[in-house]
Amino acid sequence: MPKVFTRRTIIWPTWFGWCLLLIPSVALPATILWGAERFLAALNRTSAEVLILEAWTKDEGAVAAANEFQSHPGQYKFVVSTGGLTGEGWTMKRWREDEIGERVMRNAGVPADKIIRAPAPDVETHRSYVAAVTARDVLTARGIHPRAINLITRGAHARRSRLIYSRVFGPNVEVGVVGWNPPGYGITPWWRSSDRATDVLKESVGYLYELFLHSGRIFYPGEQTRTD
């Protein structure tokens, strides 16, 4: 009768071997955890003619945009304040984010003739995408065709914003990001702050969503990525 089973010798890790095998499984998540916020936020400016403020960053973001504009004299020809309405749609009092950004930058010393408002429509989803399209269209209507733009935005939103604006403005426009965060931001690890942890988790999902699904183009099929 033929044999059904046979004896074999197997190699089994020692306790030290198990420790070595566990290092990658621990080190990789730890590296991702530690560097997630830096990955999402750490992007650099480019030599741009136009600065674009994502005005949802409120007064502090507008002040940062004014400082950026004034600290590079002769570089920026215009600064665009783009955004929709503050608050939720059901609230009674709402204000235009782009108007707030314009006012704060003007009060901070940016010449009024250098500020361009780009009032985005009031939408419930894909606000960054709609604001980017609005900024592009306002510049085009004024005959302004920048070779490069820089964005002023906050923290972990930077990488997603850069990707959105790169796709909206097309391959012939270089897009950089000037990261901004409130004073004291980043002193402790992000997972020890509920607000920052929420931002990192939300923006991680948002970045992957934009990377693979092209954001608002699913919901705004009439708008296509520029290729000219």
Image (tube, rainbow, N blue to C red):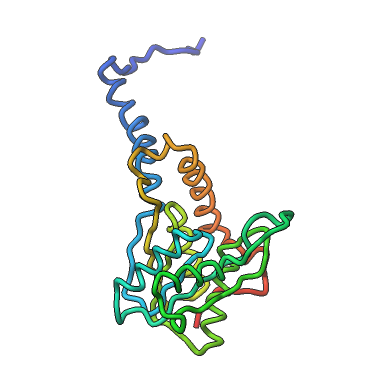
Instruction: State the image coordinates of residue 26 (x, y, percent, origin top left).
Output: 35, 30
Quarter residue 109 falls in: bottom left
Where residue 222 sits in the image (x, y, percent)? 67, 74
Outermost residue toward the top in this view: 1
| Looking at the image, residue 83 lies above or below residue 137 | above
For the residue pair 36 and 190, the one nearer the viewer reads as 190
Q: Could you say which quadrant of the image residue 25 lies in?
A: top left
Q: Residue at x 35, y 38 (%)?
A: 188
Residue shown at 36% from the left, 38% from the top: 189
Left or right side of 199 for 92? right
The residue sitting at the front extreme is 107
> Which residue is painted at 48% across and 60% down in the image?
59
In-front residue for pair 8/143:
143
- Closest to the observer, 139 or 25: 139
Q: Could you tell me residue 218's position as x and y percent? A: 65, 63
Count of marks, rendered view = 0
Q: Is residue 109 left or right of residue 218?
A: left
Which quadrant of the view contains residue 92?
Answer: bottom right
The correct choice, above or below, for 107 with respect to 31 in the image is below
Residue 193 locus on image (x, y percent)? 44, 37
- Position of residue 21 relative to residue 15, above or below, is below
Residue lying at the far left of the rendered structure: 16
Residue at the (62%, 64%) spot, across then down:
216
